[in-house]
Image: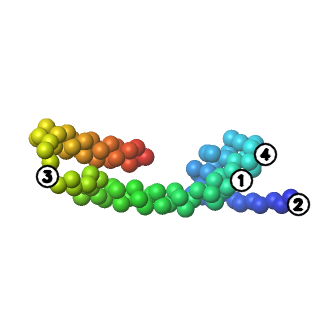
Amino acid sequence: MSKTYGFRLGENDDDLEKILGPMTGRDRSFYIKTAIRFYAACGEKIDSMADEIKEIRALLESGDLTTAVKDEGPSRKGSEEVAKKLNAEKMLRESVFDIINMGK
């Protein structure tokens, strides 16, 4: 059984016109169906990831992001080892911040 669904582009839908305009009817139909299936399957996951990124960004900006290294009690390691851990934490913060900002 075949059904047809349609919609009209409004005044603020220039972005959709740029995407859909150059396509043929069959290509446009396939694109829209694929986009709806993708959103149905992944929409909640994407929203959840966006929320987590906001939380990480807030932690980075406030400086509250701590390392996941467990407290091992008194250490026999020298100050060089401590400096390496601090440097690794700084690199982790900067890397996460860079990844988050890629979309901007």
The residue to which callout 2 is attached is: 1
Q: CA distance from mark 4 to mark 1?
A: 11 Å
> Within 10 Å of the Cα at label 4, are there few (<14), some (14-19), or many (20+) other Cα atoms?
few
Question: Which comes before the other along the chain, label 4 or label 3?
Answer: 4
Disc 2 residue type (three-letter): Met
> Within 10 Å of the Cα at label 2, are there few (<14), some (14-19), or many (20+) other Cα atoms?
few
What is the quadrant of residue 62 in the picture?
bottom left
Residue at figure coordinates x 13%, y 37% from the top left: 80
Question: Which comes before the other along the chain, label 3 or label 1?
Answer: 1
Q: Horizontal and vertical percent for residue 70?
A: 26, 54
- Where disc 4 sits, the SS reads helix
Residue at figure coordinates x 71%, y 53% from the top left: 33
The residue to which callout 1 is attached is: 33
Q: Horizontal and vertical percent for residue 60?
A: 28, 54
- Where disc 1 sits, the SS reads helix
Question: Which comes before the other along the chain, label 2 or label 1?
Answer: 2
- 3 or 2: mark nearer the eye: 3
Q: CA distance from mark 4 to mark 3?
A: 68 Å
| Closer-to-camera residue (30/84) | 84
Q: Are marks 2 and 4 in contact (CB under 8 Å)?
A: no
